[in-house]
Image: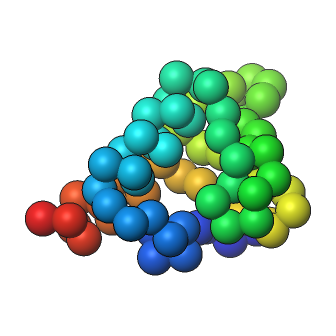
Amino acid sequence: MEQAKLSELNFTSRNEAIAFLKRLWTEEGDNCPICGNKLELLHTKAKKSNCDWQCKNCDKIFKTIHLLDEVNEEYK
């Protein structure tokens, strides 16, 4: 699995990207912005965390902290 980059997610604005990250952090879950399948938590057992999500269909990992850093860099 490889890590998803902000440029792959096709967000049109900073607000759209932040709303996506907030839905993941509140564990509402969301669909993959790349393929549309449901995202799943990456760590579901001992290290349960709402910061890392995965899409098994397109084989991407969404690390929300890294994506937030990219959002802050791109939309200064």
| Badge count | 0
58 sits to left or right of 65:
right
Residue drawn at 24 percent across, 70 percent down: 74
- The answer, for residue 59, to whether it is visible in the render is yes
Residue occupying image coordinates x 59% and y 55%:
62
**In the rendering, at what x and y percent does residue 4 appear?**
58, 67
Give the residue at the far right of this rendering: 57
Q: Residue furthest front?
A: 12
Q: Spot the residue most to the left.
A: 76
Classify residue 36 by image quadrant.
bottom right
Q: Is residue 52 above or below residue 44?
A: below
Location of residue 69 in the rendering, given as x and y in whole percent from the top left corner = 30, 57
Where residue 10 appears, as percent x and y from the top left, is 50, 71
In this view, the residue farthest toward the bottom is 7
74 lies above or below 57? below
For this view, does 44 lie left or right of residue 63? Answer: right
Image spot of residue 66 (x, y percent): 41, 57
The C terminus is located in which quarter? bottom left
Give the quadrant of the N terminus. Answer: bottom right
Residue 71 image-quadrant placement: bottom left
